[in-house]
Amino acid sequence: SDYRLRDVDFTETTCGFCAVGCRFQLVSKDDEVLGAVPTDDPADAPVNDFSTCVKGKFGYEFANSDDRLTAPLVRGDDGELHEATWDEALSRVVEGFESIRERSGPDALAAFASSKCTNEEDYLMQKFARAVLGTKNIDNCARLCHSSTVAALKQTLGFGAMSNRINEDIAETDAYLITGSNTTESHPVLSTRIKRNVDDGADLVVFDPRKVEIAEHASQYVRTTPGYDVAWINGLIRYIVANDLHDEAFIAERTRNFEAVREKVEPFTPEEVERLAGVAPEELERAAETIATADSVVFGWAMGMTQHSHGTQNVLALADLALVTGNVGKPGTGVSPFRGHNNVQGGGGDMGTLPNNLPGYRDVTDPEVLDEFEEAWGVRPPDEVGLKVPEVFTEALAGNVEGLYVMGENPALSEPDVSHAEEALEALEFLVVQDIFETETTAYADVVLPAATFSEKAGTFTNTERRVQLVGQATAPPGGARQDWRIIQDLARRMGHGWSYDGPGEVMDEIATVAPIYGGISHERLREEGGLQWPCRDADDPGTPYLYDERFNFDDGKARFVPADTGEPGEVPSEEYPLTLTTGRVLYHWHTGTLTRRVEGLMDHVGEAFVEVNPATAERLGVEDGGRVRVESPRGGIEVRAEVSDRPGDGVVFIPMHFADGAVNRLTGERFDPTSGIPEYKVSSVRVTPVGDD
Ligand code: SF4
């Protein structure tokens, strides 16, 4: 391309947006990223070959934004944030955390790691929380996305992760059941693979309250009532078992506890499924026949399954369905939670940025595990389970959490019922936010530390299929901004811990010693061999492309059926709030929009929040396409533009999550899944009223 003529640099890296894990080269000159082009050798991009989506292609632009934080900010006596030197800012952080710890103990402190950062940075963040601050309270935003998936898959299959591969299994299967995933807009390159396979004859069954784009390609689309997923999944299992379509040999040889599920699903007759989930008996039957008779099935899901007050139950039911039909641990099959952030699998899970797990999903209450970490770190980690993200906010309001260190997250916009989250942030005595831009959250910070983005750092990300891949540094962070691992190391040193990592490679070497599933992973190997899929236990282990081919991850090697319970969603429509609100994404944006709202090319496509309203609902309410409406829940109200569309069903409305103006989380509520603590973003009761254009 013409770049070749212009004396530019090419750096191979892994996309910093979603967890599909596309690889490409960043083109840069004079510390500015100019573009993204395919890798020279497609073997270096095992997931995507040459393709990327619009976010991979143009999304790097935010890195060049004039809004980037380039110097630390410290809140002065006048109540305003002022630029400060690193020395002043870091001293203030140390002083803030130490004085709270002295007065109220280490558990009055908490830290949030980031699924956007590298594995090495997140590893250091949890080590900093546990070994330097001495707190048990470490968590990250994966709490808000797939924590219920992790909880359910650990109980049933053994690992809280996707069991299969993108290209060899997902792209090659005979049939799909996709539910609660707007695959096309959230995981674009993955959805292209699926659609290509469907064009070649694979069956695609989509269950979703909203007719998302991938449903347009489905052989069968079934609209469901939000909040009743266990009902239709148990109904499918019941039909399959009753008609002898289950995989008896697989169940007998490879699983335990089938009888409990057989009993549990008994009440889920087609009539009951229709009453609860709005699925007609013939639709249920057709889907069950497709799933039970296909040679191989992939079960794909995302937030539409997980973000419920019974999110763990939803995923348990899906895992049971996969086991009943023998669709795990064989090529072309598998359970595929589509993970969101680029590094949510690694930095948000594998690295132990969790209140109950040390790196490698090791139990924080197991004394033998703690002995090992004490030996590696020279400090014994706290032996109690810490607070989850939503609990940190509740405890902050109660005055029990006083200091918080947030790396690369924006809870002031991402938490449910943000007005409540804002009060909690306000109540904190000391808040440190490390980020690349000012965000809705930095507005509450006492100290803001300017950090680096994916194009400005080296390390690794782990994609949704457990593939650990290298991230390459194309440019330097702007101005005085620094890489996150350096900031954390500096703080640890100032707090009396002699950390002296010379770079992320050395951090990965330490990860390999404490997290057995990463035991054989090193930067040298990744450079020589390309990405490695965990478990990869030693230097000779080629990694594990798909899980469970011989054993499930339990002592006896057998999977566990766990019966799933249904229940009402935490909030049901009432006379005052008669509609059900559900939330989600659009292709052109990313999460709270901190990055993508700064990219002109993306804002040109979708520049503001909107609410999708079904034509029948719109007609009843007098809502016009393009007109402004007020959407209110018991917690608050926002004004947005209406888009009349048959994507949502009658009585259901949809608002994307990316915008601060028209923030949908003013409407969502603080109801949580009891097992995982995930908020019920996908179901809230609202009313919609047209407002004048003036
Ligand atoms: Fe990046 Fe995901 Fe798009 Fe691939 S599909 S380019 S990983 S955002």
Image (spheres, grey):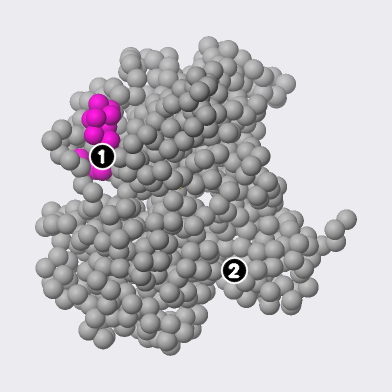
Q: CA distance from mark 1 to mark 2?
A: 39 Å
Tell me which label, 1 or 2, sits earlier in the chain: 1
- The amino acid type found where label 2 is placed reads Arg
User: In x, y percent, where is residue 243?
Assistant: 26, 86
Question: On the rendered image, what quadrant is the C terminus found in?
Answer: bottom right
Q: Nearer the viewer, residue 212 or 130?
A: 212
Q: Is mark 2 within 8 Å of ligand 1?
A: no
Disc sitting over residue 371 in the figure: none
Image vertical order of residue 551 relative to residue 470, above or below: below
User: In x, y percent, where is residue 615?
Assistant: 68, 74
Image vertical order of residue 652 relative to residue 363, above or below: below
Disc sitting over residue 647 in the figure: 2
Asked if labels 2 and 1 touch by Cβ distance under 8 angstroms, the answer is no
User: In x, y percent, where is residue 433?
Assistant: 54, 30
Dot 2: what SS?
A: loop
In percent of the image, x 60 and y 55: which residue is there?
A: 656
Q: Nearer the viewer, residue 51 or 417?
A: 51
Any magenta on residue 496?
no
- The amino acid type found where label 1 is placed reads Leu
Q: What is the number of callouts on the image?
A: 2
Residue named by callout 1: 532
Horizontal side of 485 relative to 322 (left or right) equals right
Dot 1: what SS?
A: strand
In percent of the image, x 55 and y 39: which residue is there?
A: 58
> What segment carries the magenta color?
523-536
Residue 373, quarter of the rendered image: top left
Can residue 261 be seen here?
Answer: yes
Neighbor class of circle 2 (other Cα within 10 Å; few <14, some 14-19, many 20+) is many
Any magenta on residue 531?
yes
Q: Is mark 1 within 8 Å of ligand 1?
A: no
Image vertical order of residue 429 relative to residue 673, above or below: above
Residue 520, quarter of the rendered image: top left
